[in-house]
Image: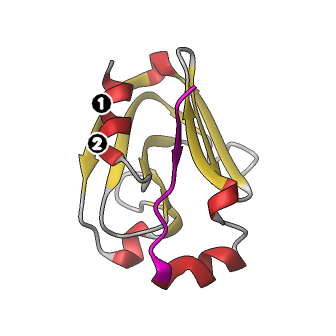
Amino acid sequence: MPRFPFRFDPVFRGPLLALGVTPASAHVDVDDEELRVRFGPWSLVTPRSNIVTASAQGPHRWWRAVGPRLSLSDGGVTFGTNADATTCVELREPVQGLEPLGVLRHPNISLSVEDVDRLAALLRR
């Protein structure tokens, strides 16, 4: 199963550590059935069949791209460790991710993994 670690910008390591997000606790796993995201205390799982498409995007403004973030414009979730690049995953059905009750559901996921192009290509298959 491919594992994609997050790429941490050294500037943001301290604030992310305060949230419990470290290189050991932040990664994306992909297999034939599911996409699984772990971002410190946050996690998200969705079937591969729920993925419409994925693309590499960026650069981004740091205040919109770093940390666990809710997009106020479209309700998407970002799990970010740098502002340079993300893999944006568009979903058929929104999923829970930021809060444990599932009240917030996200139509897309942005992930700042080390190899955004490879993750996007894998999820498009």
Name the kind of residue labelled 2 in the image: Asp
Dot 1 crowding, Cα within 10 Å, few <14, some 14–19, many 20+: some
The residue segment tinted magenta is 1-10
Q: Identify the image quadrant of the C terminus.
A: top left
Quarter of the figure with residue 121: top left
Left or right: where 108 falls relative to 120: right
Q: Nearer the viewer, residue 102 or 90?
A: 90
Query: Which numbered circle lies on residue 47?
Result: none
| Residue at x 66% of width, y 66% of height | 21
The answer to whether mark 2 and mark 1 are in CB contact below 8 A is yes
* Label 1 sits on residue: 121
Task: Give above or below for 97 relative to 21.
Answer: above
Residue to which mark 2 is pinned: 117
Depth order, front residue of 118/100: 118
Q: Identify the main secondary structure in magenta.
A: loop
> Which quadrant holds the N terminus?
top right
Q: Position of residue 119 (x, y in %)?
A: 38, 37
In percent of the image, x 60 and y 82: which residue is there?
15
Residue 40, position in %: x, y? 70, 59
